Amino acid sequence: MGEQMLTLEKFEEAYEVVKKVTLETKLVFSDYFSAATGNRVYLKPENMQFTGAYKVRGAYYKMSTLTQAERDKGLITASAGNHAQGVAYAAKCYGAKATIVMPTATPLMKVNRTKNYGAETVLYGDVYDEACAKAYELADEHGYTFIHPFDDLTVATGQGTIAMEIIKELPLVDYILVPIGGGGLATGVSVLAKLLNPKIKVIGVEPAGANCMQESLKAGKVTTLPTVNTIADGTAVKTPGEKLFPYIQKNIDDIITVKDEELVVAFLDMVENHKMVAENSGLLTVAALRHLDVKDKKIVSIISGGNMDVITMSSVVQQGLIMRDRIFTVSILLPDKPGELYRVSGIIAGVNGNVIKLEHNQFVSINRNAAVELRITLEAFGTDHKQQIMEALEKEGYKPKQVRTII
């Protein structure tokens, strides 16, 4: 079956089809991000989807367009995680067999959830691109039907149903921010948004360490990055989609890149202000809000997924607290005499510092007047409060030095 172009008719068909397997992810207005940016910011929480990400849309719509013979051959795909679960779930709905090739570093939670939908998983390669090459190999060997995670216009049409939902709910949206890995979501969303209202600006957001689409747009042709390096595993793609690229060139208004440390802080913002867990790739569009130089606009950030394993989550929370100066460690040299520790803790308590951990080393020096190093890890409300604590210690004659925090 030849691939359909991305037409309004096909988007409408996909919209009706994917309703069978998607939960209604209504827009969430964000007081916090609106106040921080001077815009009206809404989140499109695809992290709340049944499979934890938007990918079920494209996978299920693609599955609906296959012939029974194609489905009976068994399906294969490659994925860093979310497309895997989408295809596995869609295959289960259609009673088809699915094999998913995933990079070896894929978080265990994503592997297990894919298996739970009844798919066979094969772990291969360091990055998505290597897993993809292996999936093509297995497809040839066993005659499986290959479903590309992004470089497929039918899959992209399914992903674009997100734009239909956004515009139905917020017809006067000015900006839609969309994460880009290979470009399937960005293609579907930007093409449909422009079909429905050419005035809508669609901005792609990539990790700074995996900006394959930005580099391709600069070069005017699909370009492969030599390496990718980002905590946003769902968008860690070296080569964007060939078939998608002309659509991206025509419909994406700009690309913003986001550094990993911005994602860490965005995770905290989402958890604390919205009680919402988004994975790093899903946070790209939240972090990008601070890069958009506009005011008084209606902006939708697509939160593409929430499949973050708990170990990653705990390290992201810790890093975020340290980066926000909510946790910090100081080293102070004290005279080796009774009462000094009591005195220091009194100063800290006086400015509402909360001690998390203390290390007391008497063997740091042979000079008895400054013979004890005290390392204190403290909790603070943020940078200003940290400064206040440091100044209070200095005022009492100590010389606190900030050192690296290891929790």
Image (spheres, rainbow, N blue to C red):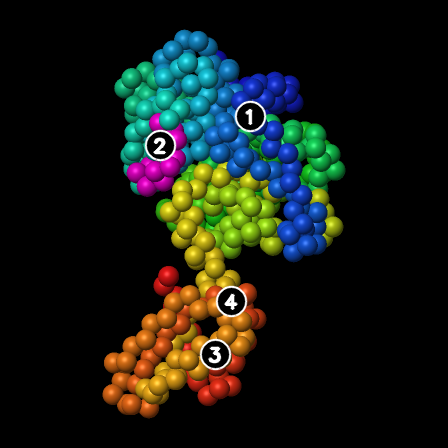
Q: Name the disc covering residue 22, or none.
A: 1
The rendered magenta stretch, by its main secondary structure, is classed as: helix
Q: Secondary structure at mark 1?
A: loop
Q: Residue at x 64, y 51 (%)?
A: 33
Q: Residues within 10 Å of mark 1 (few under 14, many from 20)?
A: some
Residue beneath label 2, please?
112
* Quarter of the image where the C terminus is located: bottom left
Q: Nearer the viewer, mark 4 or mark 1?
A: 4
> For the magenta stretch, what is the residue range?
103-115
Residue 195's x, y, as percent?
68, 29
Instruction: Return the residue nearer the eye: 385 or 140.
Output: 385
Residue beneath label 4, please?
380
- Relative to residue 35, is residue 177 depicted above or below? above
- Cα–Cα span, label 3 and label 2: 50 Å
Amino acid type, callout 1:
Thr
Residue beneath label 3, please?
346
Q: Nearer the viewer, mark 2 or mark 4?
A: 4
- Cα–Cα span, label 3 and label 1: 56 Å
Residue 108's x, y, as percent?
34, 38
Amino acid type, callout 4:
Ala
Q: Nearer the viewer, mark 4 or mark 3?
A: 3
- Relative to residue 324, is residue 399 depicted above or below? below
- Cα–Cα span, label 2 and label 4: 38 Å
Q: Residue at x 60, y 54 (%)?
A: 291
Q: Nearer the viewer, mark 3 or mark 1?
A: 3
Q: Is residue 341 left or right of residue 219?
A: left
